[in-house]
Image (cartoon, helix red, strand yellow):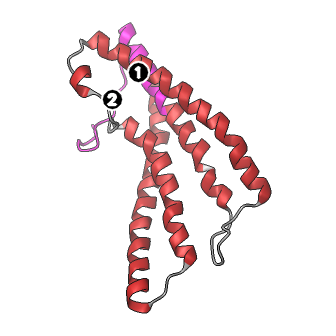
Amino acid sequence: MASLIESIEHGIGILGAFARLCLLALVGLVATDVLLRYFFAISPVGLQELEWHLLSPIALLGISYALKHRADVRVDVIYDRLPDGGKQLVDLISGILTVVIALAIVWLSWPYVMQSFQLGEGSPDPGGLPYRYLLKAFIPLGFAALALQGLADLLRAGLALSGAPMPASPAAPDQPSA
């Protein structure tokens, strides 16, 4: 069970690294767009579209990565006052809800992505980017990753409640990993 949790979280770490690279690319693109626009009076449509296209993997892959590192928003005022068993029960319930809701979004978004793929959807703007379905594919991919991270959290909480040995919990983003 512990190795499954670690495998899931390793995969989430890889997706998080990709989201970080997209964020770095977005910063570079915005800086380039500003320089081109204000110094050369050039404003390519494709460049502007690529900027907002990069937001999709950043947000949708970043959700599971943030959850892995406990950078998600929680009501810690209440959670911190609970005994360990109460915390583990909250983690178990939130893991179940995360998996169910994320899988529902994957299920509901799949036809949307497939329709875009079948239409060969691209940008309606002249000079815009083709293959918009690739952008939309991050919706089911991101929520599938969220479901996997929810499963890892669910399994971790289940192990904690059963008293079984626990795999290492991921470090918070501002703390070094062990």
Q: Is residue 12 left or right of residue 167?
A: right
Residue 7 visible, this angle: no
Where, quadrant-wise, is the C terminus in this rendering? top left
Residue lying at the far bottom of the rendered structure: 40
* Residue 79, percent from left and from top: 26, 21
Q: Which residue is mark 2?
A: 169
Q: Is residue 120 left or right of residue 147?
A: right
The answer to the question of whether label 2 and label 1 lie on touching residues, with beta carbons closer than 8 A, is yes
Label 1 sits on a secondary structure element that is helix
Label 2 sits on a secondary structure element that is loop
Q: Which residue is mark 1?
A: 156
Give, as a single range, the part of the protein colored magenta.
149-178
41, 83: nearer the viewer? 41
Residue lying at the far right of the rendered structure: 118
Residue lying at the far front of the rendered structure: 124
Quadrant in which residue 36 is drawn? bottom left
Badge 2 crowding class, 10 Å Cα cut-off, few under 14, some 14 to 19, many 20 or more, is: some
* Residue 139, percent from left and from top: 58, 46
* Residue 149, percent from left and from top: 47, 32
Q: Is residue 175 above or below residue 41?
A: above
Q: Is residue 164 above or below residue 16?
A: above
Q: Is residue 131 left or right of residue 66?
A: right
Rendered residue at 79%/54% (across/down): 118
Quadrant in which residue 170 is drawn? top left
Query: How much space separates mark 2 and mark 1, taking CA atoms?
Result: 9 Å
Residue 24 visible, this angle: yes
Q: Is residue 92 above or below residue 61?
A: above
The type of residue carrying mark 1 is Arg
Rendered residue at 32%/39% (across/down): 71
Q: Is residue 154 above or below residue 47?
A: above
The type of residue carrying mark 2 is Ser
Badge 1 crowding class, 10 Å Cα cut-off, few under 14, some 14 to 19, many 20 or more, is: many
